[in-house]
Image (spheres, rainbow, N blue to C red):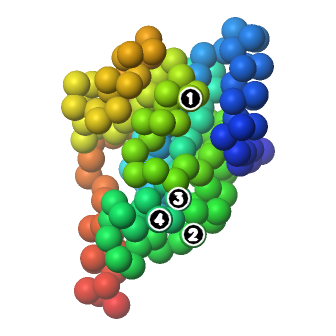
Amino acid sequence: MNAAIVTEEELTRLLDAARAGGKRVAFANGCFDVLHVGHIRYLQGAASVADVLVVGVNGDESVRALKGEGRPVMPAAERAELISAIRGVTYVTIFSEKSPSRLLQTLKPDFHCKGTDYTPDSVPEGEVVRAYGGKVVIVGDPKDHSTTEMLRRMKTKG
């Protein structure tokens, strides 16, 4: 069964209900422009941290600002749909900013999960998470996979 793709407002209500039932919430985020095994391992690692996993998918404009012209390859709605099909993901929401800081401040997940290219102290949103009492957790496999590198290889082989 696929995760629900919801608005921020819907998500706030759903998380309030989950917390009222004693559930703990983890949050992971990314562009997820071309899905690869590193994304799967990251999200499944994040899912193992709490009862509910929320995944924030960067909107199209923020992906363009972060990754450059020609990106994203797929529109946000399609990227969100792919993420919603991954085992362990509970809810998916699309956010428009380059950073998930505002969304983290609004949702206040118990855990903010980042990939192994970070340390708990180097996560840009770490201060926001720690300020409301959340914890930064590093999950996933070593950072051997890169969408940018994958697209570069496809272009040179194509």
Check the picture and name the quadrant holding the C terminus: bottom left
Q: CA distance from mark 4 to mark 2?
A: 10 Å
Give the x, y percent position of residue 63.
Answer: 42, 62
Picture quadrant where residue 70 is located: bottom left
Residue that badge 3 annotates: 59
Residue that badge 1 annotates: 106
Q: CA distance from mark 2 to mark 1?
A: 25 Å
Residue at image coords 47%, 22%: 111
Residue type, numbered disc 3: Gly
First reached walking from the N terminus: tag 4 or tag 1: 4
Q: Is residue 11 above or below residue 153?
A: above
Q: Is residue 45 above or below residue 121?
A: below
Residue type, numbered disc 1: Thr
Residue that badge 2 annotates: 75
Residue farthest to the bottom, as pictured: 158
Q: CA distance from mark 4 to mark 1?
A: 21 Å
